[in-house]
Amino acid sequence: MQIELMGSLRTIQTFIHLAGLAQIALVIGSMMIPRILNWKAALEEVQTLIKQMFWTYAAYILVINLSFGLISVFAFKDLTNGSFLASAICGFIAVYWISRVLIQFFYFDRKSFPTGIWNKLAEAVLVAIFLLLSVVYSIAFYYNYQQL
């Protein structure tokens, strides 16, 4: 049982590390979203306060994604140490990404999505990453929860 648990632990740690790299890649890729979706033109009609709040929220999301990525890359062992804090962090990250998947399919107006093969491919890749992140952190949460 202990050998099986250790093998699972190494696998979970590897996936958390890879998930961290994926989140950092998402942050880098997110830098293109304002240009692709032409945020500048879309926000010209909006009041200054609303525009400022929009950019603030976008920055918060970017920083949260980057923080999740950096924590996962550099502290993947701490995220699987079976502590309450590890459970809470992994659970929070899992809920965050599960929420993102649900927003993608149940909230966003799909009629206004950019068209074209590259945009559809990019969306498929993004959704796959969101799903992968949801699964990885859910498993890590469950692993830690079992250790409590």
Image (cartoon, rainbow, N blue to C red):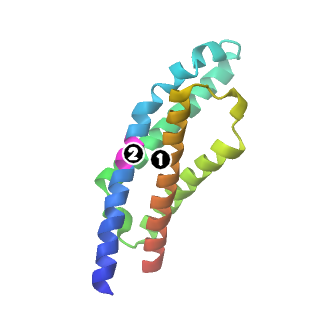
Q: Quadrant of the C terminus?
A: bottom left
Q: Residues within 10 Å of mark 1 (few under 14, many from 20)?
A: some
x and y percentages locating residue 91 in the rendered image: 52, 62
Among numbered discs 2 and 1, the one appearing first in the sequence: 2
Q: Nearer the viewer, residue 16 or 67?
A: 16
Which amino acid, by three-letter code, is at mark 2? Ala
x and y percentages locating residue 49 in the rendered image: 67, 21
Q: Secondary structure at mark 1?
A: helix
In terms of secondary structure, what is the magenta stretch mainly?
helix
Residue 129's label in the rendered image is: 1
State whether residue 85 is above or below residue 44. below
- Left or right of residue 88: residue 48: right
What's the residue at 47%, 43% (across, down)? 64
Q: Nearer the viewer, residue 117 or 69?
A: 117
What's the residue at 48%, 36% (across, down)? 62
The residue pinned by badge 2 equals 22
- Left or right of residue 40: residue 125: left
Q: Quadrant of the N terminus?
A: bottom left
Q: How many marks?
A: 2
Q: Nearer the viewer, residue 74 or 98?
A: 98
Residue range highlighted in magenta: 20-24
Q: Secondary structure at mark 2?
A: helix
x and y percentages locating residue 72 in the rendered image: 36, 53
Name, please, the residue furthest toward the bottom.
Answer: 1
Question: Is 32 a magenta residue?
Answer: no
- Left or right of residue 122: residue 21: left
Which amino acid, by three-letter code, is at mark 1? Ile
What's the residue at 54%, 28% (across, down)? 117
Residue 58 appears in the picture as rendered: yes
x and y percentages locating residue 109 in the rendered image: 72, 34
Residue 60 appears in the picture as rendered: no
Question: Is 21 a magenta residue?
Answer: yes
